[in-house]
Amino acid sequence: MNDAPIGVFDSGLGGLTVWSELRRRLPRESLLYYGDGKNCPYGDKTREQVTEAVDFAIRRLVDRGVKLIVVACNAATAMAIDHLRAAYPIPFVGLEPAVKPAALSSRSGVIGILATAATLRGKLFRETSRRYEDRVRIIARVGEGFVELVEQNRERTEEAYRRVERLLTPMIEAGADRIVLGCTHYPFL
Ligand code: DGL
């Protein structure tokens, strides 16, 4: 077995939700985490800005000898994974919002997607949504301020509660029976 570490990358703390799942499922693997707190949040940045920041971080992980990198960030996957796969000779595993399982398991025919603006703009999300939109109604919204709340350790505050409620209530009233957390920061909320 190749005992080089697996790199786990996110714009900040959100990828720790993926890191802890990897830890549980692959207890023998060594994991190297890189959170790009300096450039977080990625959600409002252009493709060029995100690609530049991601490339800088990935190069650091590659220099440390990782054998594979999990891009534990939906926004970075949407904006930069094609570039990474072309630029580096190691495998990349990306993340995208779980539209398929939500669409296939919904009974009401309405699903809600929460993600950053960068993810919702991305080709991956648009193509996957198109594939399921004759089966379910998809209500996609940006979790405004969610990433900042998590990065600033304010995810259990009254403000966080109000922001989540403001976004979810209309989805639930519209009949959504599945809500997809399409950003690795959001499970902290
Ligand atoms: N955690 C990232 C994601 O999964 C994005 C957070 C950000 O906007 O930087 O999309």
Image: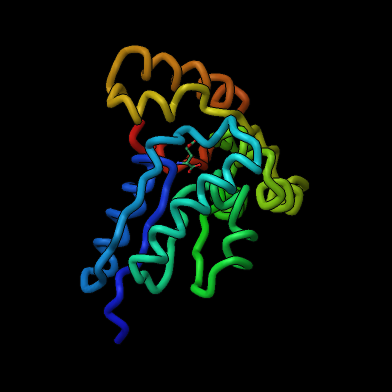
Task: Pick out the residue farthest to the bottom.
Answer: 1
| Numbered label tally | 0
Is 31 placed above or below 55 here?
A: below
Q: Residue furthest left?
A: 28
Residue at screen point 38% across, 66% down: 63
- Position of residue 68 relative to residue 118, above or below, is below
Left or right, 78 with reference to 134 = left
**x and y percentages locating residue 54 in the rendered image:** 51, 49
Nearer to the camera, 173 or 37: 37
* Res 104 visible: yes
The quadrant in which the N terminus is found is bottom left
Residue 64 relative to residue 168: left or right: left
Query: Considering the image in quadrants, where does the C terminus appear?
Result: top left
Residue at the image point whose x is 35% and y is 71% from the top: 65
Q: Can residue 176 be seen in this view?
A: no
Q: Where is residue 56 in the image (x, y as percent from the top left)?
A: 48, 51
Closer to the camera in the image, 46 or 94? 46
Colour pattern of the rendering: rainbow
Which percent across, then down, holds residue 133?
74, 45
Is 180 placed above or below 172 here?
A: below
Where does residue 157 sit, x and y in percent of width and height? 29, 17
Which residue does the image show at 48% across and 32% down from the upper left? 41
Residue at 37 percent of width and 24 percent of height: 149
Seen from the viewer's position, the closer of residues 170 and 96 is: 96
Residue 147 occupies quadrant? top left
